[in-house]
Amino acid sequence: MKNLHLLSLILAPHVSEKATLKTESDRQYVFRVVRSADKVQVKRAIELAFSVKVERVNLLNVKGKEKRFGRFMGKRSDWKKAYVKLQPGFTIELATA
């Protein structure tokens, strides 16, 4: 039961140019996580989901942008981003092409 809770903390990998460069240069992977998650929970969830050893986790709150939806102004939801650095020798295969 506890493992299912941990796995539900990771929403998706965040794919962007910056995230790809971080992966290639620093062994850091970027994930979208639940806004209530803390560093210890994210570390345990990543280790459980991908069978790797995590060296460090940094969390970042991302503010939602103000956007126009037709003639109405709206706001995208706020979300949380996790930068996960792995110990040497470990990698995560996010996409196999």
Image (spheres, rainbow, N blue to C red):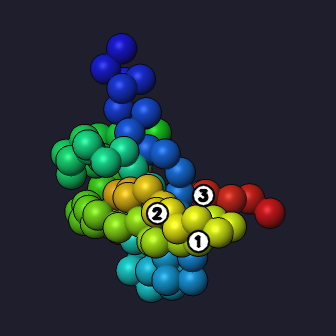
Q: Residue furthest front?
A: 71
First-in-chain label (3 vs 2): 2
First-in-chain label (2 vs 1): 1
Whether 86 is drawn above or below 18: the answer is above
Which x, y percent locates residue 33? 39, 50
| CA distance for labels 3 and 1 | 36 Å
Q: Which residue is mark 2?
A: 75
- Where disc 2 sits, the SS reads strand
In the image shown, does 69 or 59 lie closer to the viewer? 69
Question: In front of the other: label 3 or label 1?
Answer: 1
Q: Which residue is mark 1?
A: 68
Q: Are marks 2 and 1 in contact (CB under 8 Å)?
A: no
Residue at image location 39% in from the left, 80% down from the top: 26
Residue type, label 2: Lys
Q: Which mark, residue 7? A: none
- Where disc 3 sits, the SS reads loop
Query: In the picture, which quadrant includes the C terminus?
Result: bottom right
Check disc 3: other Cα within 10 Å, few if <14, some if 14-19, many if 20+.
Answer: few
First-in-chain label (3 vs 1): 1
Residue at image location 36% in from the left, 45% down from the top: 34
Can residue 20 be seen at all in this image of the molecule?
yes
Which x, y percent locates residue 32? 44, 55
Which x, y percent locates residue 36? 26, 43
Query: In the picture, which quadrant includes the N terminus?
Result: top left
Q: Which mark, residue 93? A: 3
Check disc 1: other Cα within 10 Å, few if <14, some if 14-19, many if 20+.
Answer: few
